Image (cartoon, rainbow, N blue to C red):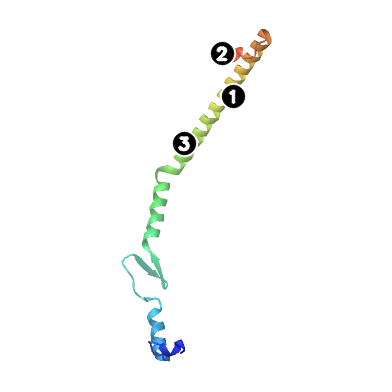
Amino acid sequence: MSHSSFRTTPPLTSALARHRRELNRPLRCRGTHDGYTLTLAGRQIRIGPVAFWIVVGVLAFRDNVLTRLIGRQAEMQVAYEDRIAELRAQVDRMSRRCSIRSSSRKNSTACFNDN
């Protein structure tokens, strides 16, 4: 016996098949809005992202926040570079002191024993 004779559901007619395809189609609402969208020129615009960028713009340009932030960043960079220059000078002094001591004492580890 073939397996096709044990079919439990009748074959789909074209009208029934079309109805099932329509049921499986994603739902599309046209002309409806929820409380968080605006319709402009036939397009829906979400209010949340628009409001977010407006608030960011107001906060960024109010009281010269960006100018102060950039100024503070420049001050931090100058302080960082000054600290690096100070540490380099300290390393140079220690290495000169070490080379003078090692040449006079003939002991290369003597410069590392004291600060």
Residue appearing at x 67%, y 10% in the figure: 106
Residue 74 against residue 31 in the figure, above or below: above
Q: CA distance from mark 2 to mark 1?
A: 20 Å
Q: Position of residue 100 (x, y in %)?
A: 66, 12
Q: Position of residue 102 (x, y in %)?
A: 66, 12
Task: Answer few, some or many: residues within 10 Å of disc 3's Cα (few below 14, many 20 plus, some between 14 and 19).
Answer: few
Residue appearing at x 40%, y 59% in the figure: 49
Q: Quadrant of residue 43?
A: bottom left
Q: Quadrant of residue 9?
A: bottom left
Of residues 19 and 83, the one nearer the viewer is 19
- Asked if residue 31 lies left or right of residue 74, the reply is left
Q: Amino acid at mark 1?
A: Arg
Q: Nearer the viewer, mark 1 or mark 3?
A: 1
Residue 39's label in the rendered image is none
- Residue matched to label 3: 72
- Residue matched to label 1: 88
- Residue matched to label 2: 113
Q: Nearer the viewer, mark 2 or mark 3?
A: 2
Q: CA distance from mark 2 to mark 3?
A: 41 Å
